[in-house]
């Protein structure tokens, strides 16, 4: 779920400079993109093949889905170190959150298909005896750029590259992607020109609108050999406001009908590149994107109006109004909001904690007023069982249920 807050005064003024009529004309109209799939909380096993016969077409299809669940569970169990043992069909029905039909052929008495199976992360983890918690990157805003015929586009018009990113299921990725849908002000704020502007102040305003900490810029350049013929895609994984190149690779498809498959393969490989960069420490958040530090609270040696003194007879110091800190936190259900607010208010030095942007099933934003150094608040959150990302006045927190076993292999596969 994408969270868009009201534009800051600087952004609103910049948009108005282009003329009110022009702004309306660019925002109005049909959809410029595709909403991304919701896949943040599921294990996925794809490419499961089945060939089942039955008395009727429906019976054969149901039997094929049952068989796909069993096969997918064995693959997932082996991948996560569970040994590959089977469980009952009733248990599988309770932990399978979806079936993805990749390709299917249905006959009167036969069902042949290639399917994907989605497992609920929490329930599957409890059966396998592992934690469902996964260490992920800080939230990264994704701006997919497609170059075709010498023209670069992001959200100005619908592109096959943005649609491929919207189709991709990110549940098994260690990158926390923030994928815009191409609606609202996306076409004005997230365009090709913006990716070539290194100004940090403007970037800070944009990524704050989308609840992100940094930006990823996946680029594809499409070269068509002739109409309807082979297509060559040159893919570039770029990162940060300076548009730094992380890696480049090339893929090819035999005809124009294979373009969606070419781009889907490109997204999968691009995700692998970004995950490898994260593991190697290259994909670090740019510290210049963090808001500038707030001025130190003023301390006065004057006696307060009420004349109170400290125990040693010296006047008590008066401090400022506290430092505003934005805290991003996961809200899978409404009860988490009040629980997290209560936890923040219970930390010494926190004057107030109120949710300013609610996104059920996604990441919400809370404004915290804190008397002290933000690093002290970060330490206090970690002491209360949270994992904390970021620094300065923008923090991202996640509740840590338990740590993963030290010998558990990294769960970064997206297919069985």
Image (spheres, rainbow, N blue to C red):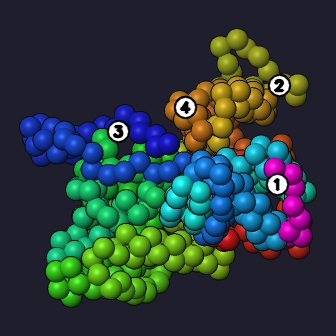
Which residue is disc 3 drawn over?
8
Label placed on residue 358: 4
Q: Do the residues labelled 3 and 4 touch (CB within 8 Å)?
A: no
Residue range highlighted in magenta: 81-89
The answer to which image quadrant residue 264 occupies is bottom left
Inter-mark Cα distance, 4 to 1: 28 Å
Distance from label 2 to label 4 (Cα)? 42 Å
Tell which tag, 2 or 4, sits nearer the viewer: 4
| Cα gap from disc 1 to disc 2, whole angstroms | 55 Å
Residue 336 visible in the displayed image: yes
First of labels 3, 4 by sequence position = 3
User: Marks 3/2: CA distance?
Assistant: 43 Å
Q: Where is residue 196 in the image (x, y as percent from the top left)?
A: 29, 69
Residue 41 locus on image (x, y percent)? 66, 50
Residue 103 in the image: state x and y as whole percent.
50, 64
Residue ID for mark 2: 310
């Amino acid at each position: 779920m994408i969270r868009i807050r009201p534009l800051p005064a600087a952004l609103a003024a910049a948009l108005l400079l282009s003329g009110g009529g022009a702004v309306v004309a660019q925002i109005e109209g049909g959809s410029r993109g595709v909403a991304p799939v919701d896949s943040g909380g599921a294990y996925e096993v794809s490419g499961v093949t089945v060939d089942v016969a039955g008395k009727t077409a429906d019976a054969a299809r149901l039997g094929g889905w049952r068989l796909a669940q069993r096969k997918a569970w064995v693959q997932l169990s082996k991948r996560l170190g569970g040994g590959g043992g089977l469980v009952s069909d009733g248990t599988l029905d309770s932990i399978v959150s979806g079936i993805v039909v990749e390709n299917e052929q249905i006959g009167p008495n036969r069902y042949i298909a290639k399917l994907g199976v989605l497992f609920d992360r929490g329930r599957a983890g409890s059966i396998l005896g592992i934690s469902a918690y996964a260490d992920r990157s800080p939230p990264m805003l994704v701006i997919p750029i497609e170059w075709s015929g010498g023209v670069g586009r992001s959200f100005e018009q619908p592109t096959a590259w943005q649609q491929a990113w919207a189709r991709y299921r990110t549940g098994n990725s260690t990158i926390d992607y923030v994928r815009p849908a191409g609606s609202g002000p996306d076409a004005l704020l997230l365009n090709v020109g913006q990716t070539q502007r290194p100004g940090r102040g403007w970037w800070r305003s944009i990524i704050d609108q989308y609840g992100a900490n940094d930006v990823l810029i996946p680029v594809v350049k499409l070269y068509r050999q002739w109409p309807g013929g082979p297509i060559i895609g040159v893919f570039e994984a770029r990162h940060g406001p300076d548009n730094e190149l992380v890696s480049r690779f090339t893929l090819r498809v035999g005809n124009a009908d294979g373009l969606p498959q070419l781009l889907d393969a490109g997204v999968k490989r691009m995700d692998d590149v970004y995950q490898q960069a994260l593991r190697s420490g290259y994909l670090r958040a740019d510290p210049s994107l963090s808001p500038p530090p707030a001025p130190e609270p003023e301390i006065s040696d004057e006696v307060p109006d009420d004349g109170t003194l400290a125990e040693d007879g010296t006047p008590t110091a008066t401090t400022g109004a506290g430092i505003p800190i934005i805290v991003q936190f996961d809200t899978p259900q409404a009860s988490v909001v009040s629980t997290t607010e209560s936890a923040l208010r219970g930390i010494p030095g926190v004057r107030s904690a109120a949710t300013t942007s609610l996104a059920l099933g996604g990441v919400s934003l809370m404004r915290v007023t804190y008397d002290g150094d933000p690093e002290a608040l970060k330490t206090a959150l970690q002491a209360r069982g949270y994992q904390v990302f970021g620094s300065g006045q923008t923090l991202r927190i996640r509740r840590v249920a338990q740590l993963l076993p030290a010998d558990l292999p990294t769960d970064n596969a997206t297919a069985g």
